[in-house]
Each structure stands twice: as structure tokens, then as C-alpha cells.
Amino acid sequence: MESLNRMATELVDEAVDFADELTLEVHELAGDAAVIDFGVDVPGAVEAGLLLAEIQTAGLASVQTRVDEVDGAPLTHVELSTDHPALGLLCSAKGGWELSVDGFEGLGSGPARALVAEEDVFARVGYRDAADFAVLAIESDELPDQTVAEHVAEMTGVPETAVFLPTYASASVTGSVVAAARAAELATFRLTELGYDPVEILSAHGAAPVAPVAGDEETAIARTTDALAYGGQVHLTVEEEFDRFDEVASTAAEEYGAPLSSAFDDADWDFSEVPVEVFAPAQVTVDVVGGPTHVVGDVHEGVLAESFGL
């Protein structure tokens, strides 16, 4: 397979070429790295969010919208489907790079992580990328500057001129869309963390409602997490049976049943102190090839209505 970063770069080029239509702003830093504003100083957009979700998976997933109901209200939902969940979701899309550079704070996702490949999942999948380009999507309420680009270039081993940093805030249209696209990723990651071999997850298809855009980052993070934990639905096809499929859905968490802002408040918004079980989709179907089909969890439209202010 071609380099994840090279495939993602082709999609970034598309974003730059159609920046006006996607309501994006492109900024060239002093070292010629490109920062693409998907939803920080601009409000973001649905189509921008769909393209960014595809960029995060390095083009290994198809992403689209549909309209469905939450507690009787028609809302946009995002669907993501991939036949390469280990590479596209775990080695690329997962938000696994915590950026803290000279006062800048952000969470990095996308294929640039595979150039560093320090997270445990890369050893488990057996993948490390080699490319002349680095694409790191950053979730932050401020745009990265030259020092961030220098840091990414140094960590990935590519020149600054080949660093692309699409950036969005959680409290943006793009942020709500990108978050809704993560249902399949959360199920794949949760199953892997429970001990399942990620290479034996053959396909992943997920959907979740797009949370209403909040007025601040904390509310946005809580709402978009609720969208997944109480409205996310996933179908996985896997090769082998496993005795912990029932723990993949968010219903396995003791906190299930109320908007997660309270759990985040209790942890003082330190996500390392939040039980990992809440970061999962609400309902998951697992098809074992040649074996049984497991259905675990359930959606909770009442909590979604409360969280979304419906």
C-alpha cells in the first residue's frame, strides 16, 4: 500500500485547491509549512468536516452524511466506512499526538503519527510510514505557529516545507462533523485496548449524530463525546471470537446514563482521569466470520436530547 501521508497529501491538495468553496483559509508559515484553517478563525462547514475526516484516515475510508432523528428531531448524522480499520483508524485517524509547544496546546491526529510510530498500536499493527510529507490534523482553539511546525518537522523527519497542519476547534461546524465520524474508530480502538488483535478487525462502519455547535470548547467536547457515547452505532466484521465483545460499547461504563459533562467536571477535565469506558460508541454489532453475531449496548436518545438542548 502507498504511504499514508502521501495519500493524505493528495486530499490536502484538494482542500487547498477548493479552499473558497469549503470556506477554508490557508496560511503559509515562515518555514513554508501550510496551516489550513478548517474551523478556528472560520466557522467551519459540513463538507470541510467530511473532507477532513477523510484526510485523517489518509483516504482509507468513505465518509458521508444522512439525516436521521434524535428524540424526534431531524439531525445530520455522519457515516464512515473502511475496509482498513487498523491502518486507517488506528495508525492514522486516532487522536494520539498530544501537542504542547511553547504554550500551544492541541491534539494531533492523522498519518503524521505513523512517521513517529511511538504509540503501542503501531507495534501491534506492524506498521511505520516512510514519506517525504507529513499531514497532522490538529484539534485546537488556536492556529499552530512556526514553532509547532518546526516541532512536527523534527519529530517526523520531513522538511518544514512538507508539513501540512489542517486545524479545527471542537466548537466549530467542522469539529462537530469530525467528531461524529469517529464512532468506528472508537469501537476499533476500544476492542484493541481490550486485547483483540487489530489486524483481525476486517471492516468497520460507524455512524453518529452531529452535535449542535457549542459556544465554548468544554461544552463542545462534552456534546461531541455524548453524540458518540449515546448515539454512535458501529458494525464491525472480525476474524476471531472474543470473550470481551460486551465491553466495547459505552454501556459498559458506570457513568452511562447522564451527559458526560458531569464526569469531565469530576475529573477537572483531565481526560486521563476519566474512565476509558465512556470513550466508546453506544451500540456495536460484531460479526465474527463463520461464527456468531454479537450485538452490545444501546442508544440513549433521552441523554442526547438533554446534552444537545433539544
Image (cartoon, grey):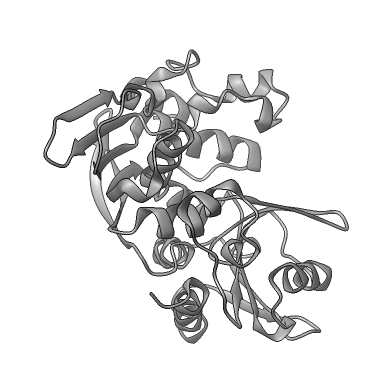
| Residue 135, image x, y percentages | 58, 71
Residue furthest out toward the top: 254
Residue that appears at 33% across and 62% down: 61
Q: In this view, does 121 lie to the left or right of 46?
A: right
Residue that appears at 39% across and 51% down: 181
Asked if residue 216 shows in the view, the reply is: no
Residue furthest out toward the right: 102
Q: Is residue 246 left or right of residue 89?
A: left
* Residue 108 image-quadrant placement: bottom right
| Residue 14, image x, y percentages | 45, 82
| Residue 306, image x, y percentages | 43, 23
- Taking 108 as reference, is 288 above or below it? above
User: Closer to the camera, 161 or 46?
Assistant: 161
Residue that appears at 80% across and 73% down: 150
Q: Is residue 140 left or right of residue 76?
A: right
User: Closer to the camera, 201 or 138?
Assistant: 201
- Taking 284 as reference, is 180 above or below it? below
**Quadrant housing the C terminus:** top left
Asked if residue 37 shows in the view, the reply is: yes
Residue that appears at 39% across and 66% down: 47
The number of callouts visible is 0
- Taking 90 as reference, is 295 above or below it? above
**Quadrant housing the N terminus:** bottom left
